[in-house]
Image (tube, rainbow, N blue to C red):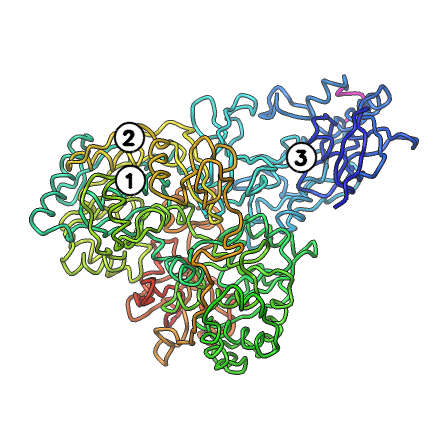
Amino acid sequence: MNSVNIRINGKDIICPEGANVMHVAIEKGFDIPNLCYDQRLSPTGACRLCIVEMEGRPGVHTSCTMKAAEGLSITTESEKLSALRKSTLELIFSEHKATCTSCDREGACSLQDYAYRYGAAEDRFPSIVKGGLSDNYTEGGIAIGYDVEKCIRCMRCVKICDEVQGAEAITLEGRSGNVVVNTPFSMLLTDSSCEMCGQCVDTCPTGALYAKAAKGKGRVRTMEKVRTTCLYCGVGCQLDLNIGADGKLVKVTSEPGVIPNDGNTCVKGRFGFDFIHRDERLTVPLIREGEAFRESTWDEAFDLVARRFSGIKEKHGSEALAGLTSAKSGNEDNYIMQKFVRTQFGNNNIDHCARLCHASTVAGLARAFGSGAMTNSIDEFSDTPLIFVIGSNTTENHPVMGIKIRKAVAEGKTKLIVADPRKISLTDIAHIHLQQKPGSDVALINAMMYTIIDEKLHDRDFIKSRTEDYELMEAAVMKCPPEFAEKVSGVPAEDIRAAARLYAAAESASIVYSMGITQHTTGTDNVLSLANMAMLTGNVGKPFAGVNPLRGQNNVQGACDMGGLPDVYPGYQKVHLPESKAKFEKAWGVSLSDKPGLTVNEIMHDVGSGKIKGLYVFGENPVLSDPDTNEVVKSLKKTDFLVVQDIFLTETAELADVVLPARSFAERDGTFTNTERRVQVYREAVLAPGESKPDWEIITGVANRMGADWNYNSASEIMDEIASVTPIYGGISYERIADVGLQWPCPDKEHKGTAVLHQGKFSRGLGKFHPVDYLPQQELPDEEYPLILTTGRMLQHWHTGTMTRKSEVLHGIVPEGHIQISPADAGRLGIGPEDKVKVSTRRGEIEIAADVTDRMKEGVVFLTFHFKESPANALTIAALDPIAKIPEFKACAVKIEKI
């Protein structure tokens, strides 16, 4: 883009040609009054406050609608402009009921500030009474309130819902002085496209739209804002926790311009943190006596845990102990937990829920590229020429990433291909939707590659210079023409060809996937197939391309990085390699085992068989998250000694011998690593309840009772140790990541982080093609169990519901689960909307209400796993991917009967 010279108030400025003049002015420190401007939105010029005078042109002009051009010269303040702004403000006050003395925004309101600056009178013009309003304009919404008397009709809420969120849920209605915002917040979500994200609240300049839970709990100017990283999905949104005078969280805001989310949030990030102050929080250690718990001191709990674990180790050997670490907790906690298991238990029996979501990503991408992580960066999605989304309901599971994709498609920047067994929201805007059967992904991807090779659309120069074993992959792919894939997947052969051509023709193409790809017995094969297709077309090692797994929980990436896996130390240094073992023995001062440990599924099996006697579960809830719930519960009940460390008494904690109370992310300092490998800070913002402690401090307390001599004083100190033993984190320190974080690999203190992996060469040298043949799912439908069940998450809840179901807003929006079923299947079974049904597999059964929807493919049903009343994993099969040992959550055979 060309640069031009413009002048603002006599000062020469160089900026991009065509840039928004108001945005440039604000960036350069000029204060131009505005009420309808938001840097995320297209300009409207609605409020008329940003008027400026332009040299050589008479009259006044709105700077927010002005584009920078060579020689442009403007004046932002003059007597004429001040007089016009004063009159405009006085007109605004005729429709804005000024109640500054009782308004939460008092002291932090632009309208109030401008009125004071220009001496605007509140009563110069007759007040406009907004009459004839429907019941929609009430306080009836569960999360968002609308005060029509404060609305100045600036259009910001309408535009952010349309242009950024892509929901188009808000409109204006009425005429003349009765024009108001048609708010959907009191409606059921089934009656509206509103996602309750709160973007409208965030952009509203006057407080007309507000978070209901925050009303009357403090004025904005008196609240302390603490910048932190969101606790939910792997995007790593930067949020500001607004803390009231009583030290409690009042509301959540987010600052535009800050990466990776640019001020945008989802409903969980905006309204889902009230769990922090719930009365059910664990506050003291609990020790089981008979069928009940009693409270204890930390000393008693530490002594008991250390004594029992040490006794099991002495009597049965180190292999009788295991630990689960947590993708919800920070890097420092995960580092300390895996260090504890390896140094105090004396084995490598440490794993976490990555085994249940992205173990096949780590295994597959490491084999193909040398690194099992997202290759590119989140910001690229806004400008990527083509995005292929497969096995990811992005707008629900990674909402801020989803709105980037929606916005890019709406602006015409991006072509979109979606492969998903359901019609998700992205399929509504996709150029091609490939609605495959669960478990048929390899056939679909191989058929796309067949087309690319057959029609000579592949990048032969990239293949020759940067890869190996192409011929082996080609031989496997050419056995899978689109006609074969059509029989297996149900996707028409011509649609497969059209998708392949569109992907291969793009200047750059990005593959985006999530657990729809990974949670299969063929999960590693699925990932290898996607890596094959990216290398086949030269779409690795450059911007706007790559293979980009969206990590599920907030710190799945970090927990893996920290060595929360049975076969690697921090930084993916293999435990069986003598040099790795020697390095960590020297760093930690103990002898270590070189035998890879057990995965979470193997741990649960050995707990059930009696081989593992003692289990330390930190921040995980396997009763709801693991496959075949009934068997998991039976196994845990057999454990000689079970310790659970969490913030609530989870379904797993209810089975424990000792429960240790941890602090939430808002009550301590630490770091998470998001899906794009960005290490980000979260900060202490509120006081912790009772005697709860940071996770790393609890684990250290147990370790020291077992003979360790650890003397950590802060999370920052632990990060320094992490950097000293983990090359990809070598340049990470709290000082360097305080603002926006850094993306690993970041090997030293001068390194700026890595936005795109594998540029020039792959981490393993040459990218490696793998021949992958289609294999059917482990359990196919039959006469007794004729439907395929696939599972996943929804927008309003997260994981096992430990936090979101304790949020009044989130639980209030979706209080119970439903099973989605196609109209054809529902009609055949005599099932109507909301009918109670029994869902059965060979492992168990549940009762749940039906959601009859045309978003489901005939023969396939969908269930979330957030609800303990109808646990999806009472149904799922425990069959495992032979390489990654990940369970097949995404496909099993079920039958449904109307109750």
Instruction: Specify few, some or many for label 1: CA neighbours under 10 Å numbering under 14, 14-19, or 20 or more.
Output: many
Q: Where 239 sits versus 444, above or below?
A: above
Q: Most prominent secondary structure in the magenta stretch?
A: loop
State whether residue 210 appears in this view.
Answer: yes
Q: State the residue in front, 850 or 261.
A: 261
State which quadrant residue 117 falls in.
top right
User: In terms of sequence position, does the residue under pointer 3 or pointer 1 come before the other?
Assistant: 3
Q: State the residue in front, 526 or 416.
A: 526
User: In terms of sequence position, does the residue under pointer 1 or pointer 2 come before the other?
Assistant: 1
User: As shown in the figure, which amino acid type bears the numbered disc 1?
Assistant: Ile
User: As shown in the figure, which amino acid type bears the numbered disc 3?
Assistant: Val
State which quadrant residue 786 falls in.
bottom left
- The residue indicated by pointer 3 is 148
Q: Where 526 sits versus 623, above or below?
A: below
- The residue indicated by pointer 1 is 336
- The residue indicated by pointer 2 is 712
Estimate the x, y position of residue 37 in percent, counting from the top left.
71, 36
Q: Which dot, 3 or 2, sits closer to the camera?
A: 2
